[in-house]
Amino acid sequence: MKIVIVSACTPRDWIIIQEIIRNFDKVTVIELTSSKNGKARKSNGWINAKGMKIIRKIHKIRLAKKLRPRFYEGLGVEKHHFPSAEVNSPEGIELIRSLEPDILFTSWAPILREAVLQIPRLAAINVHFGISPDFRGNDTLFWALYFRNYEKVGGILHYLNKGVDTGNILAEVRPGLESGNGELEVDIKTTLLLAKAAVEVLGKIKESQVLPLGKIQEKKGRNFKTSERRLANNLKLLAFHSLGLWKVKPREERIDYFI
C-alpha cells in the first residue's frame, strides 16, 4: 500500500509521520514550504497581534524542545518539497498523481480541492488536533481547555471531504489528563496518541483493503478561525490555571476506533 503524506512537517507532525514510515514500506512525504507572500491574518489590533505572535512562537519552541528527543535517527524516506500555497495548483496535482498514492495522508496541510481528493486509489485521511464536530478548525486544543470541555480535549483521524474537519471519523484520541496540565502537555500527549492511532488505522486498511465507514459527524459543530484566539483569551486561561480556578479533571488516556 503506497502512502503519500502531505504535511508542513513541524515537530508535532513529524512524530506522527515517523511512526508511519517505521511501520509501512511504501511511504513518500511531500513537505510543504511556506511563503511570505500569502494573505496576512486579521490582527484585531497591534497589541493583540504582537502578543499572539510571541505566545505562538514560545509554544512552538517549547513543543519542539519536548518532541525532538523522540525523533528517530536515520529514517530513510522519499521526500519532495513543494510550496504550501500551490498544493492545489495543476503542478501540485500532477506531483501527487505521479506518486500514485493508495492513501493520501495529511497533517497540517491546506484544505485540498476535490481534484486532489480524487487522486488516491483508496482514501484521503487527515489528522486533526481537536474532537470534531464541536471543535473543528484551528487552535482547538486551546479552545477545549478554555471552555473547560475536557471530554472534547483530544484529536481525530478522519476522511477528507470538501468541508473543514467534517469527514467520517476513523479514530478519536483523548489524552490522559492530570491536574495542572496546560496546552503544552495536552498537545504532546495528543500527538503521541494520534501517532499510535494512525498506525492502527492504516494497518487495518492495508490488511483488509476495504475502507471502513467510520463515525458519521451528524452535526455541524463549530469551525474555529485562527483570528478568534486573542491575547485576552490566553491571559485569562493562564491566570485561571495559575490561581487554580480552572482545574483539569484527571482521566486516563483513551483511543476509540471506528474501523
Image (cartoon, helix red, strand yellow):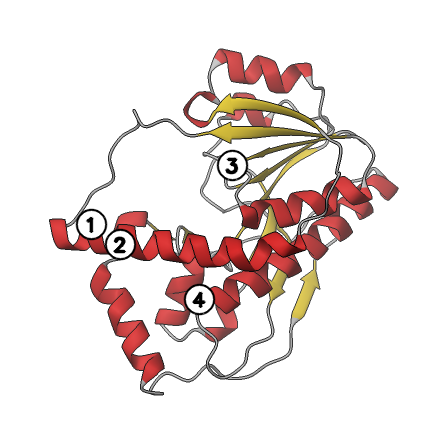
Asked whether the residues under the numbered discs 4 and 1 touch, taking CB atoms below 8 Å apart as contact, a structural biologist would say no
Q: Judge left or right: residue 110 versus residue 101.
A: left
Q: Which residue was labeled with disc 3?
A: 8
Residue 182 place in picture, x, y as percent: 44, 72
For the residues bearing labels 2 and 4, Cβ distance under 8 angstroms:
no
Q: CA distance from mark 2 to mark 1?
A: 5 Å
**CB within 8 Å, label 2 to label 1:** yes
Q: Secondary structure under badge 2?
A: helix
Q: Earlier in the sequence, mark 4 or mark 1?
A: 1
What separation in Å lies between label 2 and label 4 (alpha carbons)? 15 Å
What distance separates the C-alpha of mark 2 from that of mark 3? 21 Å
Which residue is pictured at 67% across the width and 53% down the height? Answer: 195
**Residue 140 in picture, x, y percent from top left:** 42, 58
Cα distance, mark 3 to mark 4? 21 Å
Q: Is residue 258 left or right of residue 128?
A: right
Question: Which residue type does callout 2 highlight?
Answer: Met
Crowding at label 2, few (<14), some or many (≥20) Cα neighbours within 10 Å? some
